[in-house]
């Protein structure tokens, strides 16, 4: 059924589901959709154009509000993906306005993409232990 959906044109298909919160091997919180069948859960995010998570987020003062998390790299590690290139990190939780924004004009890449060189790698601490050549 996934391949049928992948080739559906002129229709918007919405999946609504629940996220499971788990801990990975490094004790970090990760979220996965609750979907029957392990293969379906892995394939679905690759087939759809948008993956959004409605979440309760806190503002600077600590007051909670609801929003759609729309971009893959987000500070909460929620599943998200925006293939349209039109959505901000978080969006108002209103599906009608969200659809209008997705169908709207795209910003130029220079406005929506940022490139920064990574910071220089820290040098490894040196030890006072003698090297092999000093022992000889």
Image (cartoon, helix red, strand yellow):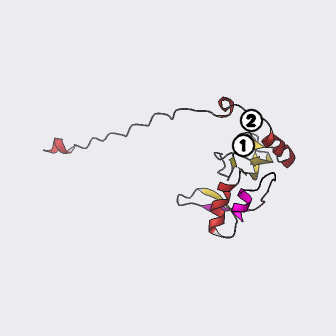
* Residue 109 picture location, percent across and down: 66, 32
Pick whichever, 126 or 1, lies toward us.
Answer: 1
Is residue 19 visible from the viewing direction of this image?
no
Question: What residue sits right under mark 1 in the picture?
Answer: 84
Quadrant of residue 108 within the rendered picture: top right
Badges 1 and 2: C-beta atoms under 8 Å apart? Answer: yes
* Residue 27 picture location, percent across and down: 56, 58
Q: Quadrant of the C terminus?
A: top left
Q: Residue at x 39, y 37 (%)?
A: 123
Q: Which residue is most to the right? A: 96
Quadrant of residue 6 within the rendered picture: bottom right
Q: Residue at x 67, y 53 (%)?
A: 79
Is residue 100 visible from the viewing direction of this image?
yes
Quadrant of residue 125 within the rendered picture: top left
Q: Which residue is most to the left? A: 136
Q: Quadrant of the N terminus?
A: bottom right
Position of 70 relative to 107 (above/below): below
Label 1 to label 2: alpha-carbon separation: 8 Å
Position of 105 relative to 42 (above/below): above
Residue 117 got which mark? none
* Residue 29 picture location, percent across and down: 62, 57
Question: What residue sits right under mark 2 in the picture?
Answer: 106
Q: Which residues are magenta?
A: 1-24
Position of 114 relative to 133 (above/below): above
């Amino acid at each position: 059924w996934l391949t049928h959906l992948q080739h559906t044109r002129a229709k918007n298909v919405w999946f609504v589901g629940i996220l499971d919160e788990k801990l990975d091997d490094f004790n970090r919180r990760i979220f996965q959709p609750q979907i029957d069948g392990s293969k379906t859960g892995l394939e679905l995010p690759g087939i759809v154009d948008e993956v959004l998570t409605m979440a309760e987020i806190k503002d600077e003062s600590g007051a909670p509000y609801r929003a759609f998390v729309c971009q893959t790299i987000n500070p909460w590690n929620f599943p998200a993906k925006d293939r349209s290139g039109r959505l901000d990190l978080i969006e108002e939780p209103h599906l009608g306005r969200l659809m209008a924004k997705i169908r709207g004009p795209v910003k130029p890449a220079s406005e929506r993409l940022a490139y920064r060189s990574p910071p220089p790698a820290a040098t490894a601490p040196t030890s006072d232990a003698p090297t092999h050549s000093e022992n000889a």
